[in-house]
Image (cartoon, grey):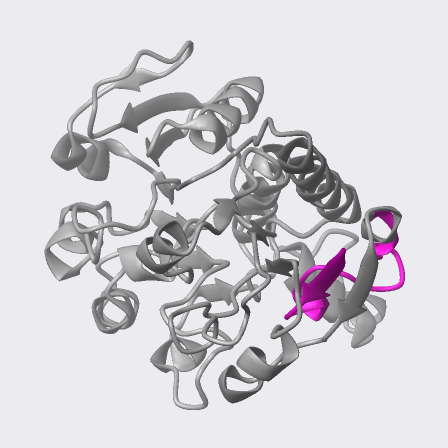
Amino acid sequence: MKIVLTDSQTVTDRLVTAEPLRELGEVEEFGLLAYDEVAERIADADVVICNKTLLDSYTLRLAKNLKYIGLFATGYNNIDIEYCRRHGIAVCNAGSYSTNAVAQHTFALILEAYNKTAKYNDYVSGGLWKRSATFSPFIYPLNELAGKTLGIVGLGAIGTAVAKIANAFEMKVIGFNRRPKTVEGVESVGFKELLERSDIVTVHCPLNADSKEMFNRAAFAKMKPDALFVNTARGGVVSEDDLYFALQNDLIGAAALDTLCVEPMEEDCLLMTAKNCIITPHIAWAPVETRKRLMGIVVDNIKNFLAGKPTNKVN
């Protein structure tokens, strides 16, 4: 069996390898194929594994032996599902592998905004503590999380995990879900009320027609002027122009983001110059343990497909 990885560098490195896949057949790895390279490279594949590679009628047209596409991801909007259905190609995704990792990164961003460890490290590294008149220079204001209100938009697995952490910090937790949902330790509220009451708003909903740019100028105007906005979901849930406006005009206090509308970041991305804005490069899902778990799910999906009992099949 020929297994082709089209964008392996989006998942693998020296710590997380594709070695488990080699137990299933011949593996050919490509770090990151360009769109025009894909069709030729997967022409003789029985199995294709990808993360974000676009697999459509053009890139799949030469793959006459292809019976299975596996995803290093939960989302599958990069796959032409109807084409695969017509040609008998099974498509299986990988879900629920990054819940704890994303919840952890969400609080890493929140804690950075509240404790400013990077700024204080720069202060010390620059030799300024050596010249301080006091042993505790209050250069950057710090705040406690206890007693603050955390508003969670999207109460799926990740949102629920975030709520558990927030409760451990003795925060007040409120949540909005489009389909009303009961979560222990979370007060269910409407979207408008969540914006108005929250000291921190964190987003954990999927990107779809309902959520696209739900965080716009009108939404930010409803938030507290010192509120922190956190997004580790998808960049498209935010209007980046409106977020920039909100930060520059003090509609909100700060933002902490792990996702943008266009990734990698564009050269002229407005948010690079926004004040009080922390950005990490879409790494919330990517701890070593998480990627190893993801590889395990992908391998198990293939084994189950070969055994005639496909798992996580989306078509």
Name the residue located 77 percent from the left edge and 61 percent from the top edge. 12
Left of 172 or right of it: where is 117? Answer: right
Q: Residue 205: percent from the left, percent from the top?
A: 34, 40
Left of 133 or right of it: where is 82? Answer: left
Left of 21 or right of it: where is 36? Answer: left
Q: Residue 180: percent from the left, percent from the top?
A: 21, 19
Q: Look at the picture and state if 282 lies above or below 7.
A: above
Instruction: Inspect this view and state whether residue 132 appears.
Output: no
Left of 49 or right of it: where is 187? Answer: left
Q: Look at the picture and state if 278 lies above or below 102.
A: below
Number of residue marks: 0
Give 243 or 43, whichever is nearer the viewer.
Answer: 43
Give 118 or 74, whichever is nearer the viewer.
Answer: 74
Q: Look at the picture and state if 201 lies above or below 137.
A: above
Give 38 or 170, whichever is nearer the viewer.
Answer: 38
- Quadrant in which residue 130 is drawn: bottom right
Q: Is residue 18 magenta?
A: yes
Instruction: Inspect this view and state whether residue 42 appears.
Output: yes
- Quadrant in which residue 271 is drawn: bottom left
Q: Is residue 245 magenta?
A: no
Give 298 or 12, whichever is nearer the viewer.
Answer: 298
Q: Residue furthest front?
A: 64
Quadrant housing the N terminus: bottom right
Name the residue located 54 percent from the left edge and 67 percent from the top edge. 64
Name the residue located 70 percent from the left edge and 59 percent from the top edge. 11
Q: Look at the picture and state if 304 lies above or below 44.
A: above
Name the residue located 16 percent from the left edge and 46 percent from the top edge. 210
Q: Which residues are magenta?
A: 1-20
- Quadrant in which residue 87 is drawn: bottom left
Quadrant housing the C terminus: top left
Q: Residue 220: percent from the left, percent from the top?
A: 20, 54
Q: Residue 18: percent from the left, percent from the top?
A: 82, 56
